Image (cartoon, rainbow, N blue to C red):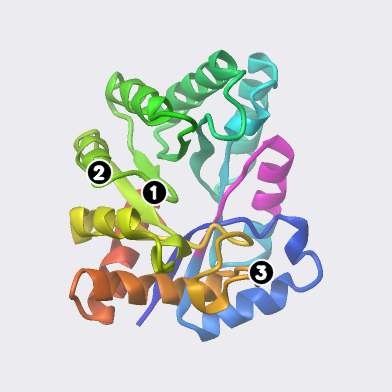
Amino acid sequence: MQLIDSHAHLDFADFNSDIGLVVKRADKAGVSKIINIGADLERSKRAIEIAHDFANIWATVGVHPEDSQIDLGEAKKGLESLVNSSNRVVAIGECGLDYFHNDQNKAEQRSLFQLQIEFAIENKLPLVVHIRNGKDESAASEAYNFLSGYKGVRGVIHCFTLSKDWVKKFLDVGFYIGFTGIVTYKNAHMVQESVRAVPIDRLLIETDCPYLAPQKYRGQRNEPAYVVEVARMIADIKSLEFADIATKTTMNCEKLFQI
């Protein structure tokens, strides 16, 4: 029985000293593949290097909305260079809108997101989308409006923490929905309701490590091996066998990222 961690950040300094051991622990836990997510141009370059070091790891390249001050021309040039540098690149992102940390640069975030949507379509690659609302739901609403306005766009809304009302909207646009260790938290009732609303053939599981360790490991550094806890919780929520969740989410991830 195999699982895939569809969203990890092994390029972060948290893993500098023991990345090899982390990958071995993941394999021992049944996590056969890992998608390492680029969050800016430099981290994306490192994500590619890691993907070349480990046969079971793939990379994405993108610019997170927190880095929205980047010059758009520089961003596009950097993405083009990274995509052309390796056949281990399987998606564009992490990109999107985050109005929780900074709602003063919304225009810059929107422009950067739009650039990456168009770049992904041009390069026939899926998107890894980050959405975090601030005082209201405008980040989710604007992200949905952007994505629904393009033909040929596809990808995953990662670390889904929105209500079940948003599930159908993003499913209708053609996106998968990814869930993290948040789903295991005792107060995560809204996220758990969203899990119930997602068909099994549109689900992905992820860690978003080193952040968001599942309840069992809360307070510790998260790592890909712990995605097993996410799968177990989702199986419980949906009253399905763990094997069914493992098999289907693996198939979903392989289909989306063509790995």
Callout 3: 10 Å neighbours few (<14), some, many (20+)?
few
Front-lying residue, 155 or 68: 68
Callout 1 touching callout 2 (CB < 8 Å): yes
User: Quadrant of the rendered structure where residue 221 is?
Assistant: bottom right
Q: Quadrant of the C terminus?
A: bottom left
The residue that appears at 18% across and 75% down in the rendered structure is 239
Q: Is residue 208 above or below residue 60?
A: below
Q: Is residue 105 above or below residue 215?
A: above
Callout 1: 10 Å neighbours few (<14), some, many (20+)?
many
The residue that appears at 39% across and 49% down in the rendered structure is 160
Q: Secondary structure at mark 2?
A: helix
| Percent of width and height locating residue 33 | 48, 68
Which stretch appears magenta? 34-49
User: Is 250 displayed left or right of 89 in the figure?
Assistant: left
| Percent of width and height locating residue 8 | 56, 58
Q: Which residue is mark 3?
A: 221
Disc 2 marks a residue whose amino acid type is Val
| Percent of width and height locating residue 103 | 57, 23
Give residue 160's mark: 1
Q: CA distance from mark 3 to mark 1?
A: 20 Å
